[in-house]
Image: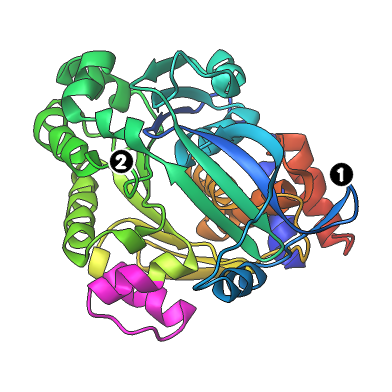
Amino acid sequence: MKEQLQDLITALNGKKGYDLKMVIGLDGFVDEIVHLVDKRTDFENFTRIPTIANLGERISRAAGLSTNIEMVPIQLKLGGNGPILSNALLNYGVKLTYIGALGEPHPVFADMAERSEKVYSLCNPAHTHALEFEDGKVMMGKLNSLNQITWARFKEVVGSADEIAKIFNSSNLIGMENWVMIPHMSQIWRGIIEEVFPLMGATKPLAFFDLCDPEKRTPEDISEAMTLIGKFEEKFRTILGLNESELYRIAAVFGLKNEGLQATTIALAKKLNIYGLVIHPVKEACCVIDNQYFHVDGPYCEKPLLTTGAGDNFNSGFCLAQSLELSPQQSLTLGVCTSGFYVRNAKSPTYSEVLQFAQKWQNGEI
């Protein structure tokens, strides 16, 4: 990785995100980060359930009986794919407009809203208990408020199709995040395609899509979503971001077998026929951009301080690099550096911090 890191450091020196305009949406969550108690030594001290497998074993032992698992709140923070992605992009100096479920806004979004160029709140935020473990996370969500996000509500709050087209035309990137948890997202995409596309110019900004774990959606729903995302290629350079589990699930919808990361990524990219497909497993990342495959290793962290939002931070680095017209390899490298910093520090990096992180990694200090 030393060569890729030096390449990124050289490319980023002198570049900033201040001239980039992005529009991100549409979700919004209040995330309550919690640890689960395994054993208590006293009222203040405890050992946590360390892994998801350990939790599963404990629940399984309670089958036919009962059990009580204590949740200890660690942090209350902004959540949702869109807000976490936006917060990371704001740290990089992007001029950002957010459209989503922020409430008035809720206090957890106050700083993000203040730093954004413009905020459009569509409804109250959803709520998540994010159960953190050493090997991942379990997200327990209450999503009722997101039912209010419809194409009619979108236009009511943001403006007419002509006004939306002007916002998109003046942006370097739009992000449509969390299709899985927003029941009417496909309807909104159809509205944009049918009403906004005819009013847009020929600049073709980037459009980034993050589904967010489609396990609970039917293959028919997923297939329709993939068709709609493909139609965005008419007016955008379209990128779909997935984690490794999502990659294999989407591939199966297309009748593709799991043949490993590289082969499945290449095969799915051919089926999607869009500008870019990017995958972010825990220990590496890869993408197909303009029909070419690229791969980088990641700075794996055995005991992360925070994992909720790591994928969104990867996406922020990748999207920023693509918007700055960096190469696919440099985009992947900035993505893994951004997420690598985030899981170790429980916050998104600034430009100087991500450059320092890349330099430390290159020097073998990470």
- Colour treatment of the image: rainbow
Q: Nearer the viewer, residue 128 or 72?
A: 72
| Quarter of the image where one finds residue 281 | bottom right
Image: magenta residue range = 248-270
Residue 339 lies, in percent from the top left, at 65, 51
Residue 72 lies, in percent from the top left, at 72, 44
Q: Nearer the viewer, residue 28 or 289?
A: 28
The vertical placement of 55 against 17, above or below, is below
Which residue does the image show at 16% across and 23% down from the upper left? 152
Where disc 2 sits, the SS reads loop
Which residue does the image show at 60% across and 57% down from the upper left? 137
In the image, is 137 to the left or to the right of 366? Answer: left
Residue 182 - label: 2
Amino acid type of the residue that numbered disc 2 sits on in the rendered structure? Ile
Which residue does the image show at 20% across and 35% down from the upper left? 188
The 10 Å Cα crowd at callout 2, few under 14, some 14 to 19, many 20 or more, is: many
In the image, is 68 to the left or to the right of 241? Answer: right
Quadrant housing the N terminus: bottom right
For residue 324, say whether it is visible. no
Where disc 1 sits, the SS reads loop
Residue 271 lies, in percent from the top left, at 24, 70
Labels 2 and 1: the sequence-earlier one: 1
The vertical placement of 61 against 120, above or below, is below
For residue 329, say whether it is visible. yes
Quadrant housing the C terminus: bottom right
Q: Nearer the viewer, residue 133 or 253?
A: 133
Q: Which residue is mark 1?
A: 43
Amino acid type of the residue that numbered disc 1 sits on in the rendered structure? Phe
Q: What's the CA distance linking mark 2 and mark 1?
A: 40 Å
Whether residue 256 is in magenta: the answer is yes
